[in-house]
Image (cartoon, rainbow, N blue to C red):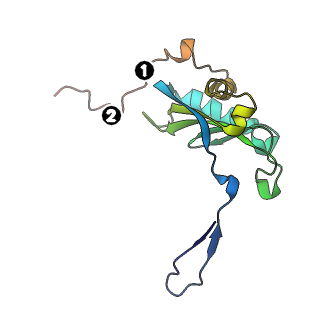
Amino acid sequence: MSVSALPLASQPTAHVRLIDTAVSVPALISHIRPALVLSESDTRRLIEAADAHGVRAGGLFLASPLGIQLWNGPFDGPDGTPGNAVHLGSVDWSYDTPVKHYATVYRSFVTSAGVNAGETTASVLARVLALSGLNAGGERVTVPIPPPRDPFRSRAG
């Protein structure tokens, strides 16, 4: 697929070609209800662990402000592109929600390649959280309530 840009102020026209593997189509989706809220320290540890085990460092994970992706191998393409690596699934979150540096995990999904590899939405979520010693059950569900969004709002008067 090709996309053409509208030239601005007599600039030359640029052509953009979309990469076929740039978008993953979910085969299975699980919405996490209630959403899993990770504290600032848990979020930081999880992102650091995903980077340490990242696809560009020989690992299987790719962290971003939108969540963490699980791949079947490290990126081996030119300029840090996936190459032969296949996206298996993702854990998606809203960062800085409900407060700054917290992450609210709201969805786990698996691609068709992930289904073929035996992954489920629960296994993708478990593998991502296990990077920093977290889990989706038990004590993770009962974490303390995060601080309110606006501390002045709760004051009387």
Query: Of the residues shown, which amino acid type is indicated by label 1?
Result: Ile
Question: Eyeballing the image, is 13 above or below 63?
Answer: below
Res 88 visible: no
Res 128 visible: yes
Report the side of 114 relative to 97 (left or right): right
Residue drawn at point x = 61 percent, y = 77 percent: 14
Residue 139 location (% of width, % of height): 55, 13
Q: Nearer the viewer, residue 150 or 111?
A: 111
| The N terminus sits in image quarter | bottom right
Query: Of the residues shown, which amino acid type is indicated by label 2?
Result: Asp
Residue 93 location (% of width, % of height): 53, 36
Q: Earlier in the sequence, mark 1 or mark 2?
A: 1
- Name the residue furthest top: 138
Q: Which residue is mark 2?
A: 150
Residue 49 location, quadrant: top right
Residue drawn at point x = 75 percent, y = 43 percent: 86
Q: Which residue is mark 1?
A: 145
Distance (Cα) linking label 1 and label 2: 14 Å
Mark 2: secondary structure: loop
Residue drawn at point x = 51 percent, y = 36 percent: 101
Residue 112 location (% of width, % of height): 68, 38
Residue 119 location (% of width, % of height): 70, 28
Residue drawn at point x = 60 percent, y = 84 percent: 12
Q: Nearer the viewer, residue 138 or 17?
A: 17
Disc 1: CA contacts within 10 A as few (<14), some (14-19) or many (>=20): few
Mark 1: secondary structure: loop
Disc 2: CA contacts within 10 A as few (<14), some (14-19) or many (>=20): few
Residue 155 location, quadrant: top left
> In this rendering, which labeled residue sits more in front, label 1 or label 2?
1
Question: Eyeballing the image, is 12 above or below 139?
Answer: below
Report the side of 9 relative to 61 (left or right): left
